[in-house]
Image: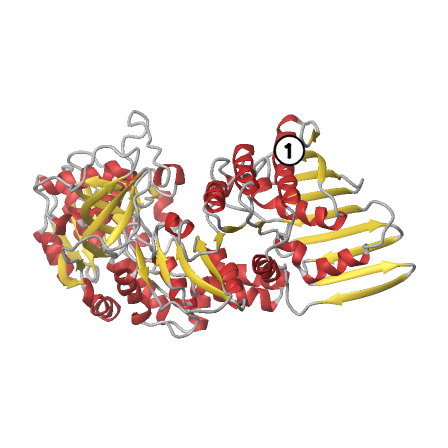
């Protein structure tokens, strides 16, 4: 894992990934995925050197390199304040990031829905945060390809870079007999030279390194030359003055020179395809005068960055999308099998995984070409790993956690660890490295990739569930049936069937069921509620939520996984209004702004909610506001009084012409108090921090809001 810290990153920090994977739990097989025992993985020298170079820069250097991220930080700083922003930034920097994206191994198990591979088959795997430098990887079915018998593990380890090169060539659309130049003869450039040669093209290689120039000639380039010479004149002479039919830019440099050079080398109406990361200031005159086509090739091929393809396994029909990521991988392996592509001369160094730090020292300070990491033949590591010696604490609540993502790492687990009288027994995550990271940091007794083992653990009293939304209901139900107290990060369920199942399991369990509706536990929320405690009339509440944009491909938007934004997040705001009114919602009317500019139906909505005591709430949930403005603004009116709550930092209370204001140094949304209330309830044997009836009604209100948004009609709960 990589623990990216602000000012003192070094090679050792980056190679923690390889060492911690060796002591972490192995992932388990999942539907649509293949469990692979790794034999080789390839260090992508260009990509990973860039990461190393960024790590070695000063803080000012990092700021200059990523102005886009700095802008986001400054925006959050103006909205949330220094303390909240600093905490979020440090939590983000502390997140473990696995390295690597190209590996080879044997199939240990294939999940439901996987076809075409069997146990013990050799497969090549691709994907950042998937095909890691790790002994065991869990790979979605569309990101692995069966290896032909004649292809070695060494060659197959190049599959990701080979697919990238192949996609670049496909984007250029070469035809038999054309002449192409390849600028940049690193690994991808050397592979592109061979693929172009196999396509029947005359190939000219160009690089600043004489060794790479010579290697390109050895691997099939018809000519290769150093950029320091008169390249344009040489290419003109080779093409009878016409210029090349196309250029693949495979260099990795911030310089704009490759783009300029490509324009000089091309014939009229030629094609230029950028494969590497280079300066992108396109000079108008040569590109205009020659009417050149300029393209950007995106990674391994169609399917890249599409969660439906990569994560959910939805393939594209070959009749419509002939070459996908996976089919490019298969095609590259076939070219290796028939000898059209050779990789043995591309391997400059190899290291056993135990010496991964040396490999990264070489990448960071030397000039290797292809660096392979080799893994010993061994049995599958265990799915549960002991981390620390159990500590006997009399009367302690023994805790298990399922989920180790950003929210768990940055908010929930620190809150649990801060509670006295708790014993951290086990933590689980799908792939294991994030669970290992948190287990080490907070001294959990064990970490695992087997969530069921936490639910059934005899030493666990209470389970915290912090997984993706679609898993909440089933895991909560299982935990309750196993006689565990349960804390579920919102939402409790994403559909009525799941909600009904959880409530039925709770009814016969005798255990506490809590949901992370933390805002009702915030200090300023409590003060606001106390202000209206003796009211004699219903309240009117106006809640503006400047929710911000979520990328369109986020799992949050998927109704089957995230449940959408109303179910997944608006439940927080409904619950706070329920808390302030002291009653449950009874009807909901939702209206949305017509989707535009990429917005979704539940991105910009108003919810009108009536509560059992007669109180009314209007929640404006908006994704298209100015992100520098505050996120949450709540105004409560009733019984001759008014209260205004701004982002859980400032509360103003007014009654009888007099006002008082409470301010907090930092934003406090009640996360820690919410966890503390649950732990205390478990210790005391109840009651639950939030009545289950309220949790159920709030959850049902989100379903009613989605229904109302679809039908345009108000929905009465229970109808």
Give the side of residue 638 with respect to residue 294, left or right. right
Note whether 719 is above or below 682 in the view shown.
Answer: above
Between 278 and 304, the residue placed more toward the observer is: 304
Question: Where does the image place residue 263, in percent across and percent down from the top left?
Answer: 30, 49
Give the side of residue 132 with respect to residue 195, left or right. right
Note whether 84 is above or below 185 in the view shown.
Answer: below
Question: Would you call the spot at circle 1 few (<14 residues within 10 Å), some (14-19), or many (20 or more)?
Answer: many
Q: Where on the picture, by quarter, is residue 322?
A: top left
Question: Where does the image place residue 463, in percent across and percent down from the top left?
Answer: 48, 53
Residue 97 appearing in the image: no
Q: Residue at x 16, y 63 (%)?
A: 352
Count of numbered circles on the image: 1
Q: How has the structure been colored for display?
A: secondary structure
Q: Quadrant of the C terminus?
A: top right
Q: Where on the picture, by quarter, is residue 176?
A: top left
Question: Where does the image place residue 174, in percent across and percent down from the top left?
Answer: 22, 37
Between 625 and 620, the residue placed more toward the observer is: 620
Which residue lies most toward the right here? 656
Q: Which residue is mark 1?
A: 704
Q: Residue at x 60, y 57 (%)?
A: 681
Question: Where does the image place residue 441, in percent across and percent down from the top left?
Answer: 41, 67
Q: Quadrant of the N terminus?
A: bottom left
Note whether 372 is above or below 192 in the view shown.
Answer: below
Give the side of residue 696 with respect to residue 156, left or right. right
Asked which secondary structure carries label 1, the reply is: helix
Residue 657 appearing in the image: yes
């Amino acid at each position: 894992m990589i623990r990216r810290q602000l000012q003192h990153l070094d090679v050792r920090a980056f190679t923690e990934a390889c060492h911690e994977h060796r002591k972490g739990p192995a992932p388990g097989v999942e539907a649509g995925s293949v469990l692979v025992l790794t034999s080789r993985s390839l260090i992508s020298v260009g990509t990973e050197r860039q990461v190393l170079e960024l790590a070695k820069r000063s803080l000012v250097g990092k700021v200059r390199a990523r102005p886009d991220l700095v802008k986001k930080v400054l925006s959050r700083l103006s909205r949330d304040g220094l303390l909240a922003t600093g905490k979020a930034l440090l939590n983000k920097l502390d997140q473990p990031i696995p390295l690597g994206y190209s590996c080879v191994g044997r199939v240990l198990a294939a999940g439901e829905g996987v076809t075409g591979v069997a146990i013990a088959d050799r497969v090549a795997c691709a994907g950042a945060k998937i095909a890691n430098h790790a002994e065991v990887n869990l790979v979605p079915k569309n990101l692995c390809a069966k290896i032909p018998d004649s292809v070695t593990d060494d060659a197959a380890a190049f599959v990701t870079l080979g697919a990238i090169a192949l996609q670049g060539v496909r984007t250029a659309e070469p035809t038999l007999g054309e002449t192409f130049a390849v600028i940049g003869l690193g690994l991808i450039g050397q592979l592109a030279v061979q693929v172009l040669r196999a396509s029947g093209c005359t190939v000219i290689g160009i690089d600043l390194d004489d060794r790479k120039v010579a290697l390109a000639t050895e691997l099939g380039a018809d000519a290769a030359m150093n950029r320091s010479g008169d390249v344009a004149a040489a290419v003109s002479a080779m093409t009878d003055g016409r210029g090349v039919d196309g250029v693949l830019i495979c260099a990795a440099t911030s310089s704009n020179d490759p783009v300029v050079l490509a324009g000089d080398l091309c014939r009229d109406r030629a094609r230029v395809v950028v494969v590497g990361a280079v300066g992108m200031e396109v000079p108008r005159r040569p590109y205009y005068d020659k009417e050149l086509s300029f393209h950007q090739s995106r990674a391994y091929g169609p399917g890249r960055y599409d969660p439906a393809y990569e994560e959910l396994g939805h393939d594209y029909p070959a009749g419509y999308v002939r070459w996908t990521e996976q089919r490019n991988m298969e095609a590259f392996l076939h070219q290796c099998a028939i000898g059209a592509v050779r990789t043995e001369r591309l391997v400059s160094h190899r290291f056993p995984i135990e010496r991964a730090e040396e490999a990264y020292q070489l990448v960071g300070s030397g000039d290797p070409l292809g660096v392979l990491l080799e893994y010993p033949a061994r049995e599958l590591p265990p799915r549960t790993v002991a981390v620390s010696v159990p500590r006997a604490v009399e009367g302690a609540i023994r805790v298990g956690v399922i989920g180790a993502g950003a929210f768990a790492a940055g908010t929930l687990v620190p809150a649990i660890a801060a509670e006295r009288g708790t014993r951290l027994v086990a933590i689980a995550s799908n792939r294991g490295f994030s669970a290992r990271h948190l287990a080490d940091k907070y001294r959990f007794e064990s970490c695992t990739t087997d969530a069921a083992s936490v639910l059934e653990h005899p030493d666990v009293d209470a389970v915290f569930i912090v997984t993706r939304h679609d898993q909440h209901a089933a895991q909560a139900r299982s935990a309750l049936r196993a006689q565990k107290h349960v804390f579920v990060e919102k939402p409790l369920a994403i559909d009525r069937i799941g909600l009904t199942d959880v409530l039925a399991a709770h009814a016969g369990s005798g255990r506490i069921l809590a949901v992370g509706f933390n805002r009702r536990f915030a200090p300023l929320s409590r003060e606001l509620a106390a202000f209206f405690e003796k009211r004699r009339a219903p309240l009117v509440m106006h809640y503006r939520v400047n929710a911000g944009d979520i990328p369109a491909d986020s799992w949050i938007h998927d109704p089957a996984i995230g449940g959408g934004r109303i179910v997944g997040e608006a439940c927080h705001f409904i619950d706070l209004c329920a808390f302030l009114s002291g009653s449950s919602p009874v009807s909901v009317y939702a209206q949305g702004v017509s989707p535009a500019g990429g917005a979704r139906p539940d991105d910009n909505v108003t919810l009108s909610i009536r509560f059992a005591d007669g109180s009314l709430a209007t929640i404006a949930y908006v994704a298209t506001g100015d992100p520098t403005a505050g996120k949450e603004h709540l105004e409560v009116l009733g019984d001759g009084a008014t209260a205004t709550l701004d982002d859980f930092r400032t509360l103003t209370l007014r009654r009888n012409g007099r006002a008082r204001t409470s301010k907090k140094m930092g934003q406090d949304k009640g996360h820690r108090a919410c966890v503390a209330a649950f732990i205390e309830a478990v210790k005391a044997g109840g009651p639950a921090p939030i009545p289950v009836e309220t949790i159920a009604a709030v959850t049902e209100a989100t379903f009613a809001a989605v229904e109302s948004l679809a039908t345009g009609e108000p929905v009465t709960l229970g109808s």
